[in-house]
Amino acid sequence: MASLILSPAEQDYITQGVERGLRADGRGGLDRREVTLRTNMISQANGSARCRTGYLGVGTDVLVGIKAEVNSWTAG
């Protein structure tokens, strides 16, 4: 994993935010983002889901699809 280097100003910003219970997006220290989960998002996949956290373009968006095939196999 790559190491993350923060300037003293960034370290101070993060530390003060934690001490005051504030985050850059305006949420409090214990506030969480809204989570939405939808399934069957990809018609060509055997299974798929999309998970979003946050709103108005602030947050995380994950889309995953699974494609499976069953084969018979015999040793020998």
Image (tube, helix red, strand yellow):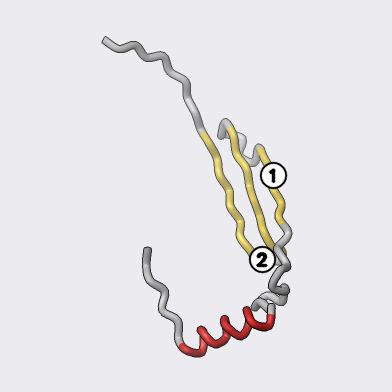
Toward which corner of the image does residue 60 lie, by quadrant?
A: bottom right
Q: Give the image location of residue 76, x and y in percent.
A: 26, 10
Residue matched to label 2: 57
Residue found at x 71% / y 52%: 36
Toward which corner of the image does residue 61 lie, by quadrant?
A: bottom right
Residue found at x 37% / y 67%: 2
Q: Give the image location of residue 65, x and y in percent.
A: 55, 40
Q: Looking at numbered disc 1 in the image, what kind of residue is underneath it? A: Arg
The answer to which of marks 2 and 1 sits earlier in the sequence is: 1
Counting every numbered tag in the picture gives: 2
Relative to 44, is 76 above or below?
above
Q: Is residue 14 left or right of residue 37?
A: left
Q: Residues within 10 Å of mark 2 (few under 14, many from 20)?
A: few
Relative to 54, is 17 above or below?
below
Taking depth in this image into account, of 35 and 11 the one nearest to the observer is 11
Relative to 37, is 12 above or below?
below
Q: Looking at numbered disc 2 in the image, what kind of residue is underneath it? A: Gly
Which SS class for mark 1? Answer: strand
Classify the position of the N terminus by image quarter: bottom left
> Alpha-carbon distance for marks 2 and 1?
17 Å
Q: Give the image location of residue 16, x and y in percent.
A: 61, 85
Residue found at x 57% / y 34%: 44
Which SS class for mark 2? Answer: loop
Name the residue at the bottom extreme.
Answer: 9
Toward which corner of the image does residue 18 lie, by quadrant?
A: bottom right
Residue matched to label 1: 38
Name the residue at the front extreme.
Answer: 19
Taking depth in this image into account, of 5 and 55 the one nearest to the observer is 5
Q: Give the image location of residue 10, x and y in percent.
A: 51, 85
